[in-house]
Amino acid sequence: MRLVGEDVLMVSGSDCYGTPITVQADKEKISPAEIVKKYHKLDLDLFEQYSLSYNLYTKTATRNHKEVAQQMFLKLLENDVIKKGIMQQYYSIEDKKFLPDRYVEGTCPYCKASDQRSDQCEACGRWLEDGELLNPVSKITGSKVILKDTEHYFRSFKSVEKELKEFVESRKDVWKKWVWAEAHGWLKEGLRDRAITRDLDWGIELPIDKIKKLSKEKQLQSYKGKRIYVWLEAVMGYLSGAIEWSRRVSGDIKDDFSEVIFSLFKGQSKSWRDYWLNKKAEHYYFMGQDNLVFHTLLWPAQLIGSGKGYTLPKNVFVNKFMNYEGKKFSKSRNWTIDSKKIAGTYGVDLVRFYLASNFPENKEGNFTWDSFLSSVNNELVANLGNFIHRVLTFVERNFDNQVPKGKLTNEVRFEIRDVFSDAGDLIREIHLVEALARIMKFVSFANKYFDKEAVWHVVTEDKEKAGQILYNCIQIIRPLSVLLSPFIPDSMRDLARMLQVEESTPKSGKNNWRYKEVKAGHKLGKIEVLFKKLDPKDIEENKANLGSKGLT
């Protein structure tokens, strides 16, 4: 989207207040703040390694996010989207305290899966009400827990139900069919009020002083130990992240740049309001299927309920789960791949290409080492890399490494025109697997064109004609450096250097998603091998080590 000249703000961040943080802190016997610092740094390193082009990747444990979360909480409370009520929360007699959801485990009453947390079953996906979990015990001590009344704030959907239904209906032909159907199903079933504060030690504090200025019916009897729950505040990070980015651009926030990924692209607006309070702005969200309900229903309800006129999601792009050799990824069972190690071993772009080719957009995917080997060796090496290398080495040997004279044939011209149009439309509609497949179809055309023209024979009889063929091949390679840059950016930067052409640098208002001629006489750079073939023996070793060692 940046390449076509759109003004794009891409923000996200580490969710710091979920109970998995405190669970891990207990395991490592350190504070939740130390866990956040440790894993957030690992996130930053990984996302930079994979060349993810965030304007801002931050975290929710910032003063800025706390301020935004508290302000929105107050606004939702004022607008009756948040109401107080009594809930039963699991209480450990042995520990003498209320336990967060993930500190309580038991058997799902619906699918009978064991070791499920008290708020949601990971096996069948059902949300669980307090008291539904069978045989609940404390995850800390294994002791039995009881339900005990406690006063909390609840998210109420009654005041925004009409607008929320209208919003979901308006997205029927925009979202994937299965995503819309699931969101619509939740609405049809009826959204229940759910507590959005908890008795916690780790979380964003309630803005008690400001709450006490509101009417009595909006105040709790006691605020001791109450925190805003992650189910309400985590998604606010999209808004707070945009605000933080804008504040960093203006210099209002100057410190801790080492704790974020930050970038400002040419021509971008510097105000978060242009992205959040602009009717022309479009919001796209990307996630796994376990976050579907939060982004299709709960977050829009908060945005509507705030009454601020914030931009609602245009498209919520949800992926199904990806399995590993036919089984669910699991760190505890050592059935996993370390993302940093696989990229370090085989190269970032090889991993990016394979994943982009196999996104589980509409059904569960499956990472297998055999398909990874095939994807790299057959597509990247034999198809894409081979074409580029054959053309460039031929120009180097026969035309002094300069682009020969020639004219774009109609056949090549129309192929270039169509691939930019087709792939661009597919990307805009978030059909990323199809978009990449369309580009690779163009690569197949390129190889067929090269083979059909048989330049290695032509050059011995008619060098001028051979130059014409190679000129057209160079004009095919140049668009590839643009078309594939969203998928394999590092390799396409290398290709641009080999061609000695300008990299596809995004600039708001300028369309770089188009053909640019590499003119005759242009001097090409040093030829390098873009993709190295994988050794099947290494892949067989990885398969042999499944569940034990290797890239885990």
Image: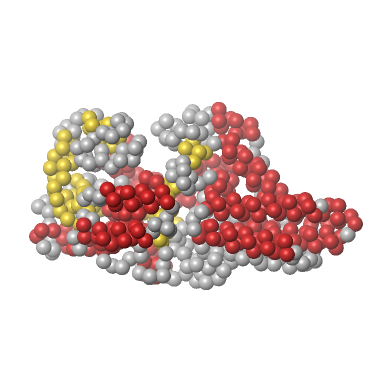
501, above or below 45, in the image? below
Give the residue displayed 80% in from the left and 62% down from the top: 468
Quick check: 500 left or right of 349? right
225, above or below 143, in the image? below
Image quadrant of residue 12?
A: bottom left
The percent coordinates of residue 257 (x first, y second) are 42, 59
Which sits in the foreground, 243 or 369? 369
Give the residue displayed 63% in from the left and 61% down from the top: 418
29, above or below 69, in the image? above
Pick out the residue farthest to the right: 461
Quick check: 400 left or right of 41? right
Q: How many labels does the image show?
A: 0
Regarding residue 334, the answer to whether it shows in the image is yes
Image quadrant of residue 513?
A: bottom right
Quick check: 452 left or right of 45? right
The percent coordinates of residue 331 (x first, y second) are 42, 35
The percent coordinates of residue 9 (x first, y second) are 44, 63
Give the residue displayed 51% in from the left and 54% down from the top: 431
Regarding residue 56, the answer to whether it shows in the image is no
Give the residue displayed 71% in from the left and 48% down from the top: 386
The percent coordinates of residue 545 (x first, y second) are 53, 29
Colour convention of the picture: secondary structure
Quick check: 446 left or right of 301? right
